[in-house]
Amino acid sequence: MEETSNSINRFLITIASFARELNTAKNTVDISKAIEKVMGRFFPIDSSLTAMYKDDEWQVVRLDDGFPLDETDMENYYSLALERKSPSFFPLNDSDYLVILPSVKSGRLLSTFFGYVGENEKGFTQEFETMFGFFSFYSGIVLENQGLLNEVKDSAKVQERLRVYFEMMLNSLDEGICVLDSSGGFVFKNKKYHEIDPGDAVVEQIKRISAETFTQDTGQAVEMEFDEVFYSFNSVILTDDEQVLLRIEDITNTKELERMKKIDQMKTEFIANISHELRTPLSAIKAYSETIEDSIESLDPDTLKEFMGTIIDQSDHLTFLLDQLLDFSRMERRDLKLEKSDFNIIELIKKAKESNKEKYEQYSVRIDLDLPEEAIMVNADEKRIKQVLINLISNAVKYSNKEMDEEKVFVSLETEGDEVTIAVKDNGVGIEESEHDKIFNKFYRIDSSLTYEVEGTGLGLSICREIIHEHGKEITLESSPGEGSVFSFKLDKAKD
Amino acid sequence: MDLKKTIQEIENLPSPDFILQKIVDTANNPEASAKDLNEVASKDPGFVAKILKLANSAYYGLPRNVTKLTEAIMILGFKTVRNMAMSIFTGKEFFRFETKNLDMKEFWKHAVVVATVGELTAEIIGYSNKEELFMCGLLHDIGKSVQGVLFPNLFDSIISVARAKKISYYQTEQRLEIPTHEIFAELLLEKWNFPELVMITASRHHRPQAIQNSIYSDPVNIITLSTFIAERMRLGDNGSGRPIELPKYCWDELGLTPVIFDELLDSVEKKVEKIEEFMNI
């Protein structure tokens, strides 16, 4: 009984040592060394060979110099290890043994330690069998865990390489990329995103668009302006609805380019337009002049006077057009100089109406004036303001609604404090809300430019706005389709 | 049936002789050396020759012939040599009785196959004490042999009923309300003073749930599984009228998966091809 308990103690102490050795083992070679070290305490191991068994092949991972068995000898012992999967003490001759200790896990042989024992005086006891059976079993578990750990490490390496690779690709893009999770937290930002360095307002938008993408369950495309910088945002759902990827692009330059392109197009249309506008009076002047030259003798004075009148009218119109062009080019150069003086605005409005007489008679539009009796003196550039009034009235007449029973233009003036407000109201076709800003743009015409249904250069309102702007005021517009339009602007009263 | 009388009858059954008893003891004695055992065994050269014949059979796949018992012990281990000795003893003394309804060769094959499957299962599921499972498998139905040797008529009628009713041998014993072969095995192995592990597996393999959560639950589950595999693969005959069902908890407890089970069946097929020498005992 005492013998048995001694033996159990020896067994436990040996197992503890072996476990301690394996604790720091990192690979098959370390495990082989642990086996040799602990086993060597029972009998001297002269030299050893350790081979891994993988994919039906033996691969020697550790071999001592002087290990007496060559590859051919080993074939037998390899197959014995494989067949038995148990420790064995193989007598090679009367005194020498080969200790075979396979590391086995779940019936699979992972590796085998072969130790050459020159002389074993102690003899072979059952204790070895039990102990080495345990070595075989335990080393198998450690070895398999090492293998699994290495697999995990390898796959982590591969993943890291892939991550770096994809990050490189994402960083090479000319668009800012960021990925957000469903709670609005940033998961990834590429290099360009940091370069764009979006401010808080933009980040807020990014989060909003991301949240929108989740609720709508579909990618979003948004363009937005922040402090004169235009951004485009495109979102797409990633990885099973858990994340959203956003592409952010600074499209300010693109926008500017678009604008320039539009201006360029408008200029082209303008040239076609203005040629037409200039040709009409010129043709008339030429035609009348030729008629007069051809038949000066046969023309009676009244007819002649009428012809000459037409030539003068058309020349005036030509002058007007050329003035407009000149003004426009000055405006382009920011060279519009005002010559301010005090004058009676009431008179000026009446003159402006008079100047449009021919036009409103031609279009059969009635112009009503609602003006105070007394003279109202304002301080402004009289010539320019007349130009504005003529233009607004002319537009009101031109864009009158032919379907109305009575086409009317209504010019009114109200005084309020130091200012007067002049309003030109019509019951014409009206203007879509979306067009309100655009009509003040250079060359812009509501009808498609080249149909010439309504004459004009497309510069009028643009010039008007510029003139009023130079006076420190704004032209305002109230209008909707079918309801007519009201253009109004303010002027400063003359100081007493 | 009078159990007292049965116990007395069991006294008349063959017992392991001194040499076999010594072999069984040394397999459990850490101090035992190969030399000691060799000295004892040399007193019965015939028995040693039989052991060496088995050791050199294809079943163990040794690279060269072993000619001494010490060599066999060192190469194959005490426990495996013990398993061979037990096979020689039981094969001769307990699987050669007179019966009308069971082919003894097939009955013996069942024992060897369950022993083989037991050891392979232990290996595959990572139960480190695999050699013990061979002995447990070998002796799991020794109770039937006791029945067959002592009460041949009873043994034959159990098999007749089992086959007619298409129920298992164990179910038949229960229906006929006679002491089961599990009880006979327990009586015999107790008398032999054999390791508790062997006795428990032989006396619980039809009701593994009775031994769950004990240190013996793994070996009992393994033997139940091995019986199931042997019956389903129709390797040998144990007198049953219907193969047993495998309790789900055996499968779960042993951590089996279809992949592991498939591997096990593969290795069983390969190993069973090599049991020829055991059949000639």
Image: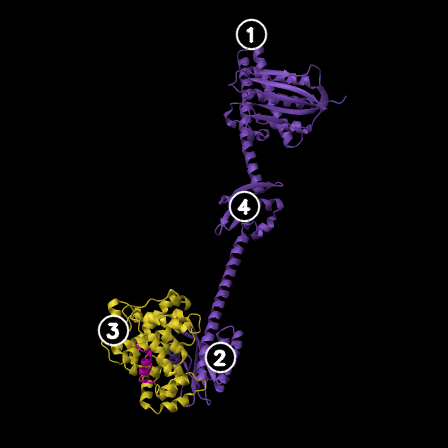
Chain colours: A purple, B yellow
Amino acid type at mark 4: Ala
Amino acid type at mark 1: Asp
The chain containing the residue under callout 3 comes to B
Magenta residues, start to end: B1-15
Amino acid type at mark 3: Ser
Give me the C-alpha separation between circle 2 and circle 1.
137 Å
Label annotation for residue B169: none
To the question of a shared chain for discs 3 and 2, the answer is no
Residue B27 picture location, percent across and down: 41, 83
Q: Is residue A180 above or below residue A460?
A: below
Q: Secondary structure at mark 1?
A: loop
Picture quadrant of residue B14? bottom left
Which residue is tagged 3? B157
Give me the C-alpha separation between circle 1 and circle 4.
84 Å
Determine if the magenta segment contains residue B8: yes
Amino acid type at mark 2: Ile
Badge nearest the viewer, 3 or 2 = 3
Which residue is tagged 1? A300
Q: Is residue B250 left or right of residue A269?
A: left
Q: Is residue A10 above or below residue A322?
A: below
Q: Secondary structure at mark 4?
A: helix
Badge nearest the viewer, 1 or 4 = 4
Give me the C-alpha separation between circle 3 and circle 1.
154 Å
Label annotation for residue A35: 2
Badge nearest the viewer, 3 or 1 = 3
Residue sitting nearer the eye, A441 or A62: A62
Which residue is tagged 4? A211
Give me the C-alpha separation between circle 4 and circle 2.
60 Å
